Image (cartoon, rainbow, N blue to C red):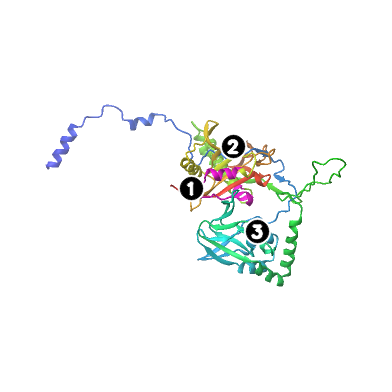
């Protein structure tokens, strides 16, 4: 017998024999305590809670507004090939002087005449008061609008970012001058289109010449500062002055919002539904998690959908750029100043953290309010709700949304239709679809929703907010 075998026998004799039932075997006779199925995707969904929901009985909501004469206030899109940047010809239609012009051949030639220029940070692009003969299209970078402060000092009036343009009035006005100076805050790539290039093409393209002549007459329309048709009024007169006559004109083609839909088919095997329902009903738990996923998708669509999403449908005049990249108290104040009665901010948690860092630098402590047992930070009394549906780009930039809500306040509203067949929650139904030959039960789960912005200033967005700056 080897020495190793003797050692094994000694150790076996030293081990005490088992005197009671082990826990592993005992579990065969025990009833376990279970949790309901958990799901990491579930969030607080503050947007769905904060939006006032309006019943849309016919499935479509029409937003009637006063007639507006404003033209072209969009952004321009570019394509990049290596170091060369070109504007998409159809995107030139976003310029006010070219809005509605659809001659593809002429737009293509205008796009080809745009000259690319690079500006270093700090370089002056335009000087206030000097004549201008060209429009600048900002492909990439940030440009500061510089003006004169109340005491003659330099003041930053605003910040322009990717897709913006300035100087477009020079294409139709030979006496145009710069109202403010433009200075590159970062390295910038700019495309320039001169008035001479446009005129040379208009001499050969009659449609372009006619369009420019029509646009040149538009500023003579009497409008208020929002571009709406003026309502003639008289005030402060005495005696028998003639009271002006007027009427309120309406937009002849108002926007209509149709209810969007999110759907899925839930399948449950009949054997599972029949035999495995204790202590929890399998079908109920499957439906509960499916409904949670639908609601998460609903909030995502309300923020990002191209047709009705808040980010994509915000008026370009209500889009702001941070003055220093990170979201500062000054930027949030500017966002608030663009609208009356702001009800809430909506920001990605990382943007809220970045704003908190800026407050810490200034020694400021934001107030908080209690909402349904949750402590929510505020700025100027307006709650800042977290929303992880707002995207964060690869460059670690995101957006902060500020809005006024409610029909009575001409704000942002949610749209839904309650009372639909087989409804289990407002505007959400679960419809039995039958059992197939494989004994699988099917349920159609459907949610209907949309959102509407009643007037442009109801919604504002602070774009390109940096969330990764630590200093």
Return the residue found at the far right: 240
Q: Is residue 434 above or below residue 190?
A: above
Q: Earlier in the sequence, mark 1 or mark 2?
A: 2
Report whether 262 appears left or right of 6. Answer: right
Disc number placed over residue 49 in the picture, else none? 2
User: Where is residue 390 shown, x and y percent of the image?
Assistant: 54, 46
- Say what secondary structure mark 2 lies in: helix
Which residues make up the magenta segment?
Answer: 309-336
Badge 3 element: helix
Q: Mark 1: which secondary structure? A: loop
Number of callouts: 3
Q: Residue at x 55, y 60 (%)?
A: 124
Residue 467's tag is: 1
Q: Nearer the viewer, residue 182 or 24?
A: 182
Residue 333 included in the magenta stretch of the image: yes
Asked if the stretch drawn in magenta spans residue 259, the answer is no
Q: CA distance from mark 2 to mark 3?
A: 35 Å
Q: Position of residue 206 (x, y in %)?
A: 73, 69
């Amino acid at each position: 017998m080897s020495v190793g075998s003797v050692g094994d026998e000694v150790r076996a004799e030293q081990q005490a024999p088992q005197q009671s039932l082990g826990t592993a075997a005992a579990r065969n006779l025990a009833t376990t305590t279970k949790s309901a199925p958990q799901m990491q995707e579930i969030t607080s969904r503050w947007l769905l809670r904060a939006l006032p929901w309006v019943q849309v009985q016919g499935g479509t909501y029409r937003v009637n507004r006063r007639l507006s004469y404003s033209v072209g206030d969009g952004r321009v899109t570019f394509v990049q090939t290596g170091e060369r940047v070109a504007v998409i010809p159809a995107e030139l239609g976003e310029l006010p002087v070219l809005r509605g012009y659809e001659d593809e051949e002429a737009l293509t030639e205008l796009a080809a005449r745009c000259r690319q220029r690079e500006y270093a940070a700090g370089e002056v692009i335009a000087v206030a008061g000097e004549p201008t003969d060209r429009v600048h299209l900002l492909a990439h970078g940030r440009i500061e609008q510089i003006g004169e402060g109340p005491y003659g000092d330099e003041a930053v009036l605003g910040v322009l970012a990717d897709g913006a343009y300035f100087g477009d009035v020079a294409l139709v006005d030979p006496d145009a001058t710069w109202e403010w100076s433009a200075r590159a805050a970062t390295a910038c790539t700019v495309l320039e289109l001169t008035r001479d290039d446009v005129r040379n093409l208009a001499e050969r393209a009659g449609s372009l010449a006619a369009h420019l002549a029509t646009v040149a007459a538009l500023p003579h329309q009497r409008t208020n500062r929002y571009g709406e048709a003026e309502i003639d009024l008289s005030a402060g007169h005495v005696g028998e002055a003639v009271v002006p006559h007027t009427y309120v004109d309406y937009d002849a083609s108002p926007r209509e919002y149709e209810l969007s839909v999110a759907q899925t088919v839930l399948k449950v095997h009949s054997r599972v539904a029949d035999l495995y329902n204790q202590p929890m009903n399998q079908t109920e738990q499957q439906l509960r998690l499916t409904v949670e996923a639908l609601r998460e998708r609903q909030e995502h669509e309300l923020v990002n959908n191209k047709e009705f999403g808040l980010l994509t449908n915000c008026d370009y005049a209500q889009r702001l750029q941070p003055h220093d990249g990170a979201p500062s108290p000054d930027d949030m104040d500017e966002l608030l100043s663009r609208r009356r009665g702001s009800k809430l901010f909506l920001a990605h948690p990382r943007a809220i953290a970045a704003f908190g860092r800026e407050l810490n630098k200034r020694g400021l402590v934001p107030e908080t309010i209690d909402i349904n047992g949750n402590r929510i930070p505020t700025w100027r009394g307006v709650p800042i709700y977290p929303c992880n549906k707002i995207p964060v780009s690869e460059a670690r930039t995101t957006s902060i949304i500020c809005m006024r809500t409610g029909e009575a306040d001409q704000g942002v509203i949610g749209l839904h239709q309650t009372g639909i067949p087989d409804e289990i929650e407002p505007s959400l139904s679960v419809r039995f679809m039958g059992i197939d030959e494989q004994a699988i039960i099917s349920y159609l789960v459907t949610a209907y929703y949309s959102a509407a912005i009643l007037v442009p200033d109801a919604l504002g967005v602070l774009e390109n907010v940096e969330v990764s700056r630590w200093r």
